[in-house]
Amino acid sequence: MGDVAESYRQAFRFLAPFLLTHIALRLVSAAIVLPLIGVLLALTLKFSDQTALTDQDIARFIFTPAGAVGALLIGSAVIAAMTLDVAVMTATIRSGDRRPAAALSAGVAFAVRSAPVLLAVAAGLLLRIVAMAMPFLAVCGVLYVRWLSTYDINYYLTYRPPEFLTAVGLIALVLAALTLVLLDRLTGWALVLQRVLFERSGTNAAFRESRALMKGRRIKLIKILVLWLAVRLTAGAAISAATAFALAYAPALGRQSLASAAIAVLVFLAASLAATTTLSAWSNGALAKLLFDLYRRVSDGRAFDRGENGPSSGTGRSAALMVGGFATIGVLSLGSIGTVVAFSERIKADADVVVIGHRGAAASRPENSMASVRKAIEDGADWVEIDVQESADGEVVVAHDSDFMKSAGNPLKVWDATLRDLDRIDIGSWFDPAYSDERTPLLRDVLLAAKGRSRVIIELKYYGYDVDLENRVIAVVEETGMADSIATMSLKYPAVQKMRALRPEWRTGVLAATAIGDLSGLDGDFLAVSLTMVSPYLVRRAESAGKDVYAWTVNDAATMSRMISMGVGGLITDEPELARRVIVERNALPTIARLALWISDSFGVTFDRLANEVVEQ
């Protein structure tokens, strides 16, 4: 405990330069490193002939030569950015200069000089971690196939049968073993940066030398790091508790004014951010001090040369680099300012979004059933979203999962089911016995029910057993006369492209739970993305490309309001009636109340006055 306490005490002496350097490097990361990673990603994706990859395509692409190289470069850049803070702080401790301006100037210069070395070290570290992790991850894959691939994954996630719990337990044990192995290796490599940055060792040699120097010392280092982390987490928890306390009482400051309450919350959040940033700089500095002292001990207390490798050399050049760096940061930050301005305009604007019933009205009726579809239409949904697959006899049926285990406890696969089979499978009782008469509908049934009342988004589902899904969907849509009232989308991007080629006049969309790259560059009229992916930047890019952004699955009022403030064009929700009501109520609120709603959803703050205003609408 003494070493950890001393490291925090010494770091406190350097807190001013550490904090200034920490903030500067955060700005550099936001304004330079992140765009650089974006450029690397764009160059990598050139080999995929797409501007973005989604979901399963990401994993497949990573295993191609171009994807593997791109992942290595991007991962190395991320690790280098994460370690840069500690590296620069180590250099500051080594120089002994506590003057903030001098430390900042020298730190920027040191960061520029060290960037190539840090990238090389990060790449070496990443390759070693991947090599160690692959056998463990392969075992996890075998366990998944053995225990969790018999039925659709949604069945396991919903009911958590014994085999699910067994698989989760075994996978957890494998990952725990991997964690122990990584902990052993990472502590053995604790001195790699010291060797590379200050002793000029080659990257591979530095890993070997660090392991040799740390022999017999890893357990002690683990104990020290655990204590260091405990101090950091405890301080962080104290800041979080103080923030939560302040936020809980902030709305009381606005009993007479919602604007005062919102401003008070923003002030408390700013204070929390300042405290968290200070803690981060302080604890990172303490970590740098711990590793620096460790290296001095294992190197027999040898004094380090403070010559050309020292962070304080080249004052004039350092100043020039600092000025140039901050000028670059300033230019690149204009985009962020534009985002803030655009966001404020979104909050002021009235909502002009469409309501999309997710699998009908899935919160109040069995999903993808006719009862759910009819309820969504009754609730005023602009669109009803459904999932379709092919049956064994070539019909287009409405079903999300690959089998009927979740909805009926029946293992029959959709592609093996005939219409006679579907007539015997009750898909409603799992939700409520009142819906025991519900059966898997056909696409034709849904389109006829929605005709003249609502539009329908058809999600094309693929499990590798489709025969001619796109053309069969086209035939049903045209047969029912609904071509002007439907849209199609899919997680499978080639299917989106195929539908656009077959029916270019139809509305099509890209569905994504995760993505890398520029989604706005993909073919399609809209992007249906997980709400965690929604940002003002994505919305702005999509709008520039003439595309709408639909967020899924949004089921509470505050999140609906926040998505509207982000600028989405549609809410995909299990609660279409609630979404319709939220849109009306939000439009009736003043701008400050809309801001308060956004704060409420983003930070969990309850505004009693706002709640009363909403209720009174």
Image (tube, rainbow, N blue to C red):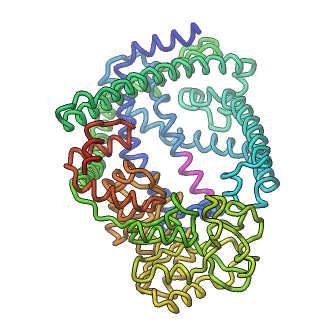
In front here: 444 or 115? 444
| Residue 13 spot, x, y in % from top left | 39, 12
**Residue depicted at 76% across the width and 59% down the height:** 149
Find the residue positioned furthest to the left.
256
Q: From where the camera sits, is residue 71 visible?
A: yes
Find the residue positioned furthest to the bottom.
479
In front here: 1 or 194? 1
Find the residue positioned furthest to the top.
2
| Residue 433 spot, x, y in % from top left | 64, 60
**Residue depicted at 21% across the width and 31% down the height:** 255
Write the start and end of the magenta stretch as one range: 67-76
* 593 relative to 504, above or below: above
**Residue depicted at 28% across the width and 64% down the height:** 352
Examine the residues drawn in magenta and state their main secondary structure: helix
**Residue depicted at 30% across the width and 42% down the height:** 611
Rendered image quadrant of residue 58: bottom right
* 444 relative to 565, above or below: below
Q: Quadrant of the N terminus?
A: top right
Rendered image quadrant of residue 566: bottom left
Give the number of marks.
0
* 495 relative to 232, above or below: below
| Residue 558 spot, x, y in % from top left | 37, 48
* 430 relative to 478, above or below: above
- Give the left or right position of residue 337, taking residue 81 as reference: left
